Image (cartoon, rainbow, N blue to C red):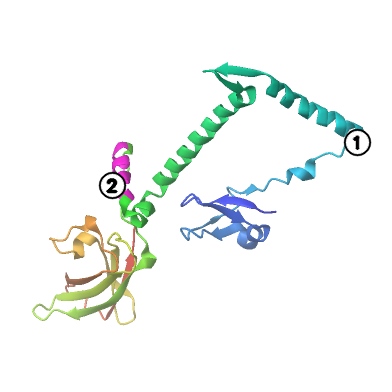
């Protein structure tokens, strides 16, 4: 049994097969945001082909049905309403409300898509960003910078003793944004470890901690650009033997 399911993280709907539902107790990974979720929660099975439900009728009944289908069409063609000296058939009068409803629904869907994917749209289509920002001002939302951790990374890092103070160590790191658009500055988690690789201390470094005072964090790390970090930390008498440095975006 095939159908569609909805990712609760990014609201993307995609097709799933019966084999995917049976494997791993229904757990799948979204191909858009890469988050795992239970596909059975919002699963909608495909409707059967309408032709499979059509009854089989004999020739006499088929002729009656054909007559019933032709008669209303013939009557509608004969009866015409005159508006502004132009003939308008009854069929035409009944179709325009449906066309208006469909057009309205399409506009609503496009606006919803622009709202939920405003960050991606602003990144991929910079010309739309001013329009999205103005719209978000009225809707009390925000067009933030993208946060794709797979497109930004730590190219190199080192930890060394400060030459002028025994209590200080200097963290050096090189961040690079590989994306073709600007991204938000990430947060860094630094762990100082002992000889057995057990943590002695841990610190979350936010952009305002490692950026120069003259460099605002709101502009983000430009497309395909690097950022060198040199940060002095007071370790007192911890005497770390090693460290670990991770990059992440908070949820």
Within 10 Å of disc 2 (Cα), the crowding (few <14, some 14-19, many 20+) is few
The number of callouts visible is 2
Number of the label disc, if any, that sits on residue 16: none
Q: Quadrant of the N terminus?
A: bottom right
Quarter holding the C terminus is bottom left
Q: Does residue 193 appear in the picture of this structure?
A: no
Residue 127 in the image, given as x and y percentages of width and height = 31, 51
Taking the view exactly as shown, the residue that stands out farthest to the front is 85
Residue at the spot 73% in from the left edge and 46% down from the top edge: 49
- Pointer 2 and pointer 1: residues touching (CB < 8 Å)? no
Q: Earlier in the sequence, mark 2 or mark 1?
A: 1
Check the image and report above or below for 238 versus 142.
Answer: below
Q: Give the magenta-colored segment's residue range.
A: 128-138
Q: Which residue is mark 2?
A: 130
Residue at the far left: name it: 164
Most frequent secondary structure within the magenta stretch: helix
* Magenta region includes residue 73: no
Which residue corresponds to the image point at 46% horizontal and 58% vertical from the top-left? 33
- The answer to whether residue 249 is above or below residue 88 is below
Q: Indicate the position of residue 204 as horizontal and vertical percent values.
A: 27, 63
Q: Residue at x 19, y 80 (%)?
A: 160
- Relative to the observer, which residue lies in front, 181 or 139? 181
User: Which secondary structure lies at badge 1?
Assistant: helix
Q: Which residue is mark 1?
A: 59
Residue 73 lies left or right of residue 35; in this view the side is: right
């Amino acid at each position: 049994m095939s159908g569609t399911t909805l990712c609760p993280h990014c609201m993307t709907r995609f097709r799933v097969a019966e084999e995917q539902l049976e494997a791993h107790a229904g757990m799948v990974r979204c191909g858009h945001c890469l988050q795992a979720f239970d596909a059975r929660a919002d699963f909608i099975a495909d409707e059967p082909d309408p032709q499979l439900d059509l009854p089989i009728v004999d020739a006499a009944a088929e002729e009656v049905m054909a007559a019933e289908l032709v008669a209303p069409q013939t009557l509608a063609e004969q009866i015409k309403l005159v508006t502004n000296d132009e003939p308008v058939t009854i069929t035409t009068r009944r179709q325009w409300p449906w066309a208006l409803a469909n057009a309205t629904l399409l506009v609503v869907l496009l606006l919803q898509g622009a709202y939920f994917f405003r960050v991606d749209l602003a990144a991929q289509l910079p010309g739309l960003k001013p329009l999205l920002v103005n719209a978000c001002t009225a809707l009390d939302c925000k067009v933030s910078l993208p946060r794709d951790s797979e497109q930004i990374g730590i190219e190199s890092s080192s930890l060394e003793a400060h030459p002028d103070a025994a209590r200080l160590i200097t963290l050096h790191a090189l961040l690079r944004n590989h994306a073709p658009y600007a991204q938000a500055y990430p947060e860094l988690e630094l762990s100082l470890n002992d000889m057995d690789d057990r943590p002695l201390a841990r610190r979350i470094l936010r952009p305002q901690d490692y950026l120069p005072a003259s460099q605002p964090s709101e502009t983000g790390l430009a497309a395909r650009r690097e950022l060198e970090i040199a940060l002095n930390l007071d370790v007192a008498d911890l005497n770390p033997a090693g460290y670990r440095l991770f990059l992440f975006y908070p949820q």
